[in-house]
């Protein structure tokens, strides 16, 4: 290893989202590192040997096996790892549309408040940070370990809806709409859930460098250009500017 160079190990990309979406975070990281690169410094990127889920990725950063991950934030994660407090995707993931069975729209037409929504069961991943938000707000839960099986579970009436971010839901309808699913027409759920880079608590210098690089990239417009180059993100951002739905605000655990 050359003295003065930067060596980082990242998680191996394993995403069911469109490829451009899954690579955005890596591209944003590289942009931030380039903005703060010293003269003659080389940046060396390596990847973990196996695909691992998000829970495992966070553990590997804590253990020092991975240098950095990108993840939604909560109090526990910010204690176990050092967050780079720069919301990477402008909060578009914080607005959730409901994925329902198409023939249930009339039932959801009656939902006006959180209390109304509490009469329906929501499906969520057992390790998703969203799950704790839903539980905290009294939404009846059915959980699953497997992402793909949840769409079949919804079609089979194991629960009534999933809350999916604006940048995810159109892609998921393309993939799973044939199961009789549809986007609910009137509602949007909102709760704060920033997506940050996280590093090991013993590496505050890396966190500071990434923070500075992201701020520089925002100031010169290059981060915005990268964000808007991702079709799902651009479409979600544009949709969010003209969203006309009944908003149900959820609280997050302290």
Image (spheres, rainbow, N blue to C red):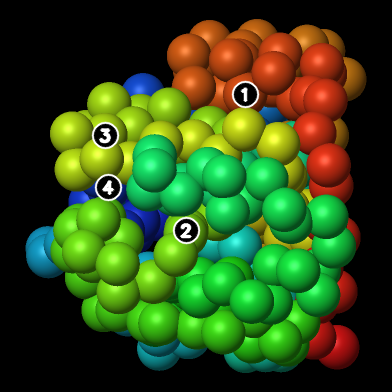
Is residue 174 visible to the viewer in this orientation of the structure? Answer: yes
Residue at 60 percent of width and 15 percent of height: 234
Q: Nearer the viewer, mark 3 or mark 4?
A: 3
Mark 2, residue position? 162
Q: Specify the label residue 236 is tagged with.
A: 1
CA separation in Å, label 3 and label 1:
19 Å
**Is label 3 in a helix, a strand or a loop?**
helix
CA separation in Å, label 2 and label 1:
18 Å
Q: Tag 4 or tag 2, which sits nearer the N-term?
A: 4
CA separation in Å, label 3 and label 4:
19 Å
Q: Specify the label residue 40 is tagged with.
A: none
Q: Tag 1 or tag 3, which sits nearer the N-term?
A: 3
From the image, which quarter does the C terminus lie in?
bottom right
Residue at 70 percent of width and 67 percent of height: 117
Q: Is residue 56 left or right of residue 169?
A: left
Q: Position of residue 149 (x, y in %)?
A: 18, 64
Q: Position of residue 139 (x, y in %)?
A: 64, 80
Q: Tag 3 or tag 2, which sits nearer the N-term?
A: 2
Mark 4, residue position? 15
Q: Position of residue 181 (x, y in %)?
A: 33, 41
Is residue 85 visible to the viewer in this orientation of the structure? Answer: no
Judge whether 107 appears above or below 171 on screen: below
Q: Nearer the viewer, mark 3 or mark 1?
A: 3
Q: Nearer the viewer, mark 1 or mark 4?
A: 1
Bin the neighbour count of mark 4 within 10 Å (Cα to Cα): few under 14, some 14-19, many 20 and up.
Answer: few
Q: Observer-nearest residue: 169 or 177? A: 177
CA separation in Å, label 2 and label 4:
19 Å
Mark 3, residue position? 177
């Amino acid at each position: 290893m050359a003295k003065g160079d930067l060596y980082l190990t990242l998680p191996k990309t394993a995403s069911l989202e469109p490829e451009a979406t899954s690579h955005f975070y890596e591209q944003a990281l590289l942009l931030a590192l380039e903005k703060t690169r010293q003269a003659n410094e080389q940046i060396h990127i390596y990847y973990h040997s196996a695909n691992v889920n998000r829970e495992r990725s966070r553990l590997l950063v804590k253990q020092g096996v991975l240098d950095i991950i990108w993840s939604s934030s909560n109090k526990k994660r910010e204690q176990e790892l050092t967050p780079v407090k720069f919301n990477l995707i402008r909060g578009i993931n914080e607005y959730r549309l409901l994925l329902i069975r198409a023939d249930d729209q009339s039932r959801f037409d009656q939902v006006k408040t959180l209390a109304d929504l509490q009469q329906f069961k929501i499906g969520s991943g057992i390790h998703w940070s969203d799950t704790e938000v839903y539980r905290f707000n009294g939404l009846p839960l059915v959980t699953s370990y497997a992402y793909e099986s949840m769409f079949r579970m919804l079609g089979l009436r194991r629960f009534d809806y999933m809350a999916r971010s604006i940048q995810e839901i159109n892609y998921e309808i393309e993939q799973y709409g044939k199961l009789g699913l549809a986007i609910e027409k009137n509602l949007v759920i909102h709760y704060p859930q920033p997506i940050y880079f996280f590093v090991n608590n013993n590496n505050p210098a890396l966190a500071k460098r990434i923070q500075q690089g992201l701020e520089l990239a925002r100031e010169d417009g290059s981060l915005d250009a990268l964000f808007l180059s991702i079709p799902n993100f651009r479409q979600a951002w544009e949709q969010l500017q003209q969203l006309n739905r009944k908003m149900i605000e959820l609280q997050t655990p302290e």
